[in-house]
Amino acid sequence: MLAATLRLPWQLRRGRAWRWVWLAILVVLPLVAAWRVSLTPAQTLGVALVAVAVWWWWVQVDSLLAQNHPNHARLVPGQRRSLRTALLAHATLAGVLAWLGGAIVAGPGLEWALWVLVGLPVLAWTQRQPWIWLPLSLMSLLPFAWRAAAVRFAEAPALLWLPALAMALVSLLTLLGTGSASHRRVHARLQRWRADARRNGEGRSLAVTARRPWLRTLVTPFAWPDRWLRRHVLARPTSANAVQRLDLALQPQAGAPMVAWMIVLVFGGLNVALMVGEVLRPDLAWARLVDGGRLGLCMGLFGVVAGMPIGRLTLLWARRREQPVLALLPGAPAGAALAAALERRWRREAVLLWLLGGSLVLVIAMHGSPRSLHFVGGFLAAALPLGVWVETRWRTMHGKAQTALPSIVLFGGSLAAAMTAQQFAIPPWVCLPVGVLLHMAAVQLRGAPGAAVLPLGRTALGQPAL
């Protein structure tokens, strides 16, 4: 039973694209850390060991929680004991790897061992009780909280590792349920989330607001642009807005108006906060704050803006049920004409969103050092032509689309360009025109699509419909 428990995580993930995602992350993280803080090769290896330990621990806890079915915990003899044994074995392996990596980076000591003893149970419990991410996210906005914890750990007496180890063991041993009512509720919630993930991949996603009507009131301040546009367009169906109505039927849950509004709220709000802060507290090191957050700003902008084009890869393949309806819409183009019209509309949306978000992020970067400005300029310049490559994949799908590779290529290429621009001090007024020219050249070289884009005109096997 223990051997089967240990084999199951890799059997479930065999042949999936997750391996490439984590491989890229595990390669990029140490290299980025080495570049940011000038680590030695040995320290870079230490960071890689910590990343591998976190990845290993996360995968194993996810698998063990999936196997910890309430009925099995009560009815299968020895199943829960086997899961606990596997959990402690993986905790030991992940803890040793994490401590060894931390010792290589910062030197061996009690402080890093305490971080490991606290971090492993917390990371495990976030998978069973996701609300734990809320206080962790709030702490990430308060750097002094982490500094205070680091000081406490550094000044802790040597005997503190015994109660810390005991608390870690208790937390891990109580992670797996015994089939109680609370365990059943937790398991049912995890099953709902996995079912939602499967439906999203098949294009049968159900909005959270549909299951929780009270959430509609909470999201109204953010979703009102999409609702207004949908009501306005659908109230006046004409041949002129046929492509726009097709886009409304095919788009993810967040359309371009809502994304633009979110960009204004988030990055515009950061600009206002910086300006107010510099006026009220000019003695604070605002430039250092911006410099430290330049990568996070680019990641946030990427997550907001790139979600639409990457999300369409899965959505266009999955939502084949609308084909008869789309074919009957009045005045709609067909075949290659439809594909070209949709691509032009999506490309305009992508460019406008990047211009809006990029302008606001560049203004934020101006509050920092020139290195931040160079970094952001390089990131934005590379994202435009790489986005054309993502659009091209819409034409070449022959099965359920995988979004991992486009995400890695788009973000990794933009990050490499940002690091190059910062390293060689290339200003944005040089990077951005080059990015625009490359974008225009990529569009011209690609040309117009010669066949229908999914879902209209294709069958489940990816062949043209008869």
Image (cartoon, helix red, strand yellow):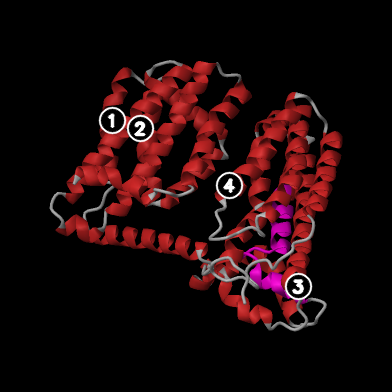
Of the image marks 3 and 2, the number of the one nearer the N terminus: 2
Describe residue 242's horizontal placement relative to residue 92 as left or right. right
Q: Which dot marks residue 165? A: 1
Query: What is the three-letter code of the residue carrying label 2?
Result: Ala
Where is mark 3, residue-wise?
243
Where is mark 4, residue-wise?
405
Residue at disc 4, secondary structure: helix
For discs 3 and 2, the disc positioned in front in the rendered view = 3
Residue 251 lies in the magenta stretch = yes
Residue 13 % position (x, y): 39, 49
Of the image marks 4 and 3, the number of the one nearer the N terminus: 3
Quadrant in the picture for residue 247: bottom right
Residue 139 % position (x, y): 52, 40
Is the residue marked by circle 1 packed among few (<14), some (14-19), or many (20+) residues within 10 Å? Answer: some
Between the C-alphas of marks 4 and 3, the distance is: 28 Å
The stretch in magenta equals 242-267
The residue lying toward the viewer, choosing from 230 and 24, is: 24
Of the image marks 1 and 3, the number of the one nearer the N terminus: 1
Of the image marks 2 and 1, the number of the one nearer the N terminus: 2
For discs 2 and 1, the disc positioned in front in the rendered view = 2
Q: Is 187 rendered above or below residue 331?
A: above
